[in-house]
Image (cartoon, rainbow, N blue to C red):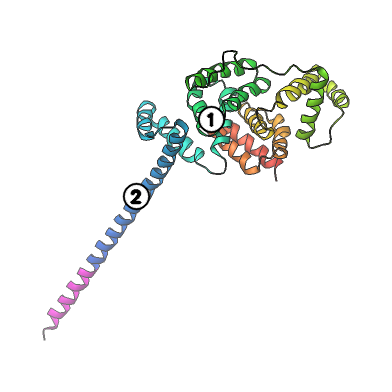
């Protein structure tokens, strides 16, 4: 037997084996890279699909993809983020109902005077289960917490959209507020204050005396108007009104007031998870800094 040939054959086989291993490793690396790319693509596709599902319910359209294509072409990367992050990541979360998230967004848009965006979210509110009365009441409550100019502008645009959707007021127009006496306002305000603070029904005169040194006549109007008239109205639940007020205070950066209204929201039945979802929604509609400050208040006040 020729030992030299055997050795050469062995060396050749070993070399071929090494080459095969190298090729196999290279193929494995390529496969891993392809798999990673496929996973990344799948993640994006999942977000996009969730976003399209939200658009479908928000706009009551059977062709959300057509809207998304035009939207992305018009707004570029910003449009992509609106579709995939705002709709696909935030809106698709199940920790808050779409009805409640829509209420929160209506509130934030009104408080920020972004009435041009209401054309998406007023129809969405109807599609997600809010009534025309509840939608208009959001704008009414805004008057006390974001100021009447913003509330009136938001109401005007809301009325225009609702009329186009077949929900215009009757020939007599919208009903006005109740004509309450000062005593009735004070009594209702005291009841609202008791629930907000989690205490027994306070003596309104004592409360006003305590507030007089800090707020002057503002304390009296706060109890009589904001609490006694606006908060006491039956068109929205107290839970809804707490979601609304925390939303306004968050997007306007009113941290001191959140110290009062975050605990009050819990007393009105809002959970910590729902408050966290409110802050995530604020991230998308008012920016990260305000959302971070709001989230800190939730962590501080809700165990």
Residue 262 is situated, as x and y percent measured from the top left of the image, at 69, 36
Closer-to-camera residue (163/300)? 163
Name the quarter where the N terminus is drawn. bottom left
Mark 2 or mark 1: whose residue is earlier in sequence: 2
How far apart are labels 2 and 1 at the CA level? 31 Å
- Determine the image quadrant of residue 210: top right
The magenta span reads 1-17
Closer-to-camera residue (146/192)? 192
Residue 145 is left or right of residue 128, and the answer is right
Residue visible at 41% across and 45% down in the picture: 46
Residue 114 is left or right of residue 26, and the answer is right
Q: Which residue is mark 1?
A: 285
Query: Answer yes or no: do the residues labelled 2 and 1 have beta carbons within 8 Å?
Result: no
Relative to residue 286, is residue 217 depicted above or below?
Answer: above
Relative to residue 27, is residue 292 depicted above or below?
Answer: above
Residue 52 is left or right of residue 114, and the answer is left
Question: Does residue 4 belong to the magenta stretch?
Answer: yes
Question: Does residue 205 belong to the magenta stretch?
Answer: no
Tag 1 secondary structure: helix
Crowding at dot 1, Cα within 10 Å, few <14 / some 14-19 / many 20+, comes out as some
- Determine the image quadrant of residue 77: top left
Q: Which residue is mark 2?
A: 38
Residue 213 is left or right of residue 282, and the answer is right
Residue 187 is situated, as x and y percent measured from the top left of the image, at 82, 25
């Amino acid at each position: 037997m020729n030992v030299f040939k055997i050795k050469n054959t062995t060396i050749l086989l070993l070399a071929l084996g090494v080459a095969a291993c190298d090729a196999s490793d290279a193929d494995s690396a390529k496969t891993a890279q392809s798999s990673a790319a496929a996973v990344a693509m799948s993640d994006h596709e999942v977000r996009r699909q969730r976003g399209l599902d939200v658009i479908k319910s928000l706009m009551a359209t059977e062709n959300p993809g057509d809207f998304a294509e035009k939207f992305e072409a018009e707004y570029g990367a910003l449009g992509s983020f609106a579709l995939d992050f705002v709709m696909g990541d935030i809106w698709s979360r199940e920790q808050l109902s779409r009805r409640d998230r829509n209420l929160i967004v209506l509130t934030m848009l009104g408080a920020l005077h972004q009435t041009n965006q209401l054309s998406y979210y007023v129809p969405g509110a109807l599609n997600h289960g809010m009534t025309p009365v509840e939608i208009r009441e959001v704008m009414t409550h805004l008057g006390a917490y974001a100021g009447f100019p913003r509330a009136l502008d938001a109401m005007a645009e809301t009325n225009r959209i609702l009329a186009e959707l077949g929900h215009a007021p009757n020939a007599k127009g919208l009903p006005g507020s109740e004509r309450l006496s000062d005593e009735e306002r004070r009594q209702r305000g005291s009841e609202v204050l008791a629930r907000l603070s989690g205490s027994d029904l306070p003596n309104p005169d004592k409360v006003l005396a305590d507030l007089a040194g800090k707020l002057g006549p503002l304390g009296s109007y706060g109890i009589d108007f904001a609490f006694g008239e606006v908060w006491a109205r039956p068109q929205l639940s107290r839970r809804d009104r707490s979601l609304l007020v925390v939303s306004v205070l968050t997007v306007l950066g009113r941290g001191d007031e959140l110290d009062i209204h975050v605990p009050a929201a819990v007393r009105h039945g809002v959970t910590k998870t729902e408050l966290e979802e409110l802050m995530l929604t604020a991230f998308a509609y008012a920016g990260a800094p305000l959302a971070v400050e709001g989230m800190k208040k939730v962590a501080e006040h809700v165990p």
